[in-house]
Amino acid sequence: MKIIANNYEAKDVVKFIREWTDLNQKDFGKTLNRSRDSINNIENGRNRMYLNDFINMCNTHNIKIIIEKDKK
């Protein structure tokens, strides 16, 4: 699956990635050394994820990040 992250809030992108892994919040958090509550807070917009943590999450779950200049 492919999404254009610019069309979503960061919290939604994190949730999409977790859902792609077929893991619940607790098990997903374990893969990132975070608690279920931490993942829940990120997905609900109460906490933010640092860029380095986001990149680590993507690397851990084989998610490719592509940055591309819009041709407008």
Image: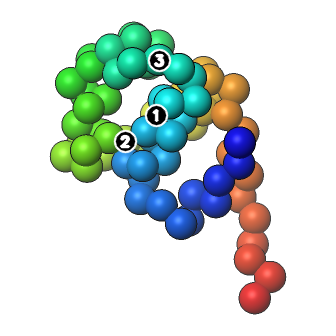
- Precedes in sequence: disc 1 or disc 3: 3
- Tell me where residue 46 appears, x and y as whole percent: 19, 46
What residue is disc 2 on?
49
Crowding near pointer 2: few (<14 within 10 Å), some, many (20+)?
some
Q: Which quarter of the picture shows residue 36?
A: top left
Which structural element holds mark 1?
A: helix
Label 1, label 2: how far apart the Cα atoms are: 6 Å
Indicate whether 3 appears above or below 31: below
Q: Amino acid at mark 1?
A: Asp
Crowding near pointer 3: few (<14 within 10 Å), some, many (20+)?
few
Which label was assigned to residue 23?
Answer: 3
Of tags 2 and 3, the one toward the viewer is 3
Indicate whether 69 appears above or below 43: below
- Precedes in sequence: disc 2 or disc 3: 3
User: How many numbered circles does the render carry?
Assistant: 3
Do labels 1 and 2 touch, CB within 8 Å?
A: yes
Label 2, label 3: how far apart the Cα atoms are: 18 Å
Quarter of the picture containing the C terminus is bottom right
Q: Amino acid at mark 2?
A: Met
- Tell me where residue 48 appears, x and y as whole percent: 31, 46
Q: Residue at x 75, y 65 (%)?
A: 68
Q: Amino acid at mark 3?
A: Leu
Give left or right: position of 16 versus 36. Answer: right
Closest to the observer, 4 or 57: 4
Which structural element holds mark 3?
A: loop
Label 1, label 3: how far apart the Cα atoms are: 18 Å
- Tell me where residue 23 appears, x and y as whole percent: 47, 17
